[in-house]
Every structure is written in C-alpha cells, then in structure tokens.
Image (spheres, helix red, strand yellow):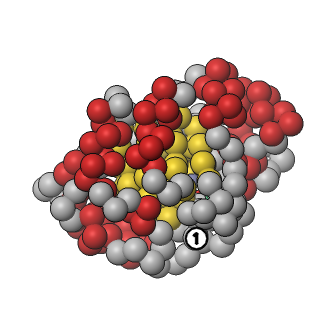
Amino acid sequence: MEYIIAPSILSADFGNLQRDIEMINYSEADWFHVDVMDGVFVPNISFGFPVMAAVKKHASKPLDVHLMIVEPDQYIADFAKAGADRITVHYEACTHLHRSIQLIKSSGCKAGVALNPHTPVALLQDVISDLDLVLIMSVNPGFGGQQFIHNTYKKINDLKRMIDGVNEDLIIEVDGGVGLQNIGALVQAGANAFVAGNAIFGTENPAETISQMKGSATK
Ligand code: DX5
Ligand code: ZN
C-alpha cells in the first residue's frame, strides 16, 4: 500500500515560498496540498490563482487542490489551467455535486469530495464510484493548527465499508490536526493520504518530519 503525505502550503512561510516549495520537492512528500479559501464558505481567506501559479512554477510534485469556496463549478476550469492535478470540492458547497464531479473530470483532473466534520459519509453513496478521492476533514475547515476531531476514525471506517467491492482504489485522505502522533492510528483505520500543515512546518526540520511521517505510515 502506498501512503501519501501532502504538506499543506497554507502553513508555509509565504515570504520564502520558493524555499519551502523546494524543501517539499526534495523531501519524501508526495503531493502539495493547496488550500483555497474564499472568506464565505470558511471564515478565512487564503490565496488564489497568482499564488497557485507561483507554486506550480516551482513544484515538482502534483498539486492537490482543496477548494473551500462556494460555487466551485465557476472556477474548476481555471484551477485545472493553473496546474491542479486533483481538485476537491466540498459536499456542503455543491448543490449539484454530480455535475461538479463531472466538471472536474472533464477538465482533466482527478476528482475529490471533502466532508466537513458534521457531514456523514453515507451522503456520498450515490457518487462514490465516480470519485478518485474523499477528503475527510478532521477539523472544521478554515485554519491550520487546529485540534484533531476524534470522530474522524469512525468516518474512515464508514467510508472503508462503503467502498468495499465498489471503488477500492478510492483514496481516503484526512485533513486537519494530522501529525506523527496520530498517523499510525489513521493508517490502521484505513486512511491512505495525509495532509499536514502545522505538524510539518511547525517543526525544526520539516523535511525530516515528512520522512518520519512517511515512515510511521508505512511500518
Ligand atoms: C484547514 C485546511 C488544512 C490545514 C491543515 O482548513 O484544509 O489543509 O492547512 O493544517 P493543520 O495540519 O495544521 O491542521
Ligand atoms: Zn486542506
């Protein structure tokens, strides 16, 4: 089983963004996690296309774009053009979720859906076989550095059961409060992709932390 580590550049030093991108390039990380926030869907504004284009210019690994925005359909083609490899929209932001998923795929990207902590996995039942990835939010989206919500383990279990015999290649990604302290337990529960911001950029040697996370997931 391959375990994916996706450092969230939201926690990078934006004054030294190129340096932090190079660090990820040379580390054992697999993807760049790119958090786009609009100040409407979540109570924070992060960055948009110019910053994403700057990341794309230097990044040597896929961009895993997490859209915390309302009406994402309007921007999917633009995010694909800006270099997204995976685009994840929020269940709670999509009235016509099936259409959003098809739009992502027709833009040439892998399609993901994110679930807020209060949104049950069961609501994905009728689109689960169309998806490449489900992003289980283990904090309320909007900020890095928040505390992991324990009910996430139950949701991973529920999702594992749902994809059994239906879409076993689906990637189960966890986002929020993930680090060395819980990555092993999350692997045990069935997750296989891990976003981490603070747990990586808040340490003395981020590349080494990435390597340790990869090691704890794999063993
Ligand atoms: C939260 C974002 C996360 C965030 C994770 O809204 O979606 O990707 O950057 O940060 P940490 O790992 O610090 O909880
Ligand atoms: Zn995220």
| Residue behind mark 1 | 140
User: Relative to 212, is 148 above or below?
Assistant: below
| Residue nearest the observer in this picture, 85 or 28 | 85
Q: Which residue is depicted at the point 68% across and 44% down?
A: 47
- The answer to whether one can see residue 58 in this image is yes
| In the foreground, 205 or 114 | 114
Amino acid identity at mark 1: Asn
Label 1 CB less than 8 angstroms from ligand 1: yes
Q: Secondary structure at mark 1?
A: loop
Ligand 2: image quarter: bottom right
Task: Name the residue nearer the viewer: 105 or 206.
Answer: 105
Residue at 66% over, 72% down: 147
Displayed quadrant of residue 111: top left
Residue 202 in the image: x percent, y percent?
Answer: 79, 53
Residue 141: x and y in percent read 58, 64
Quarter in which the N terminus is drawn: top left
The percent position of residue 73, horizontal first and vertical second, equals: 40, 46
Q: Residue furthest left?
A: 165
- What residue is rendered at 22% in x and 48% in y? 130
Q: Residue furthest right?
A: 15
**Looking at this view, is 206 or 115 the one in front?**
115
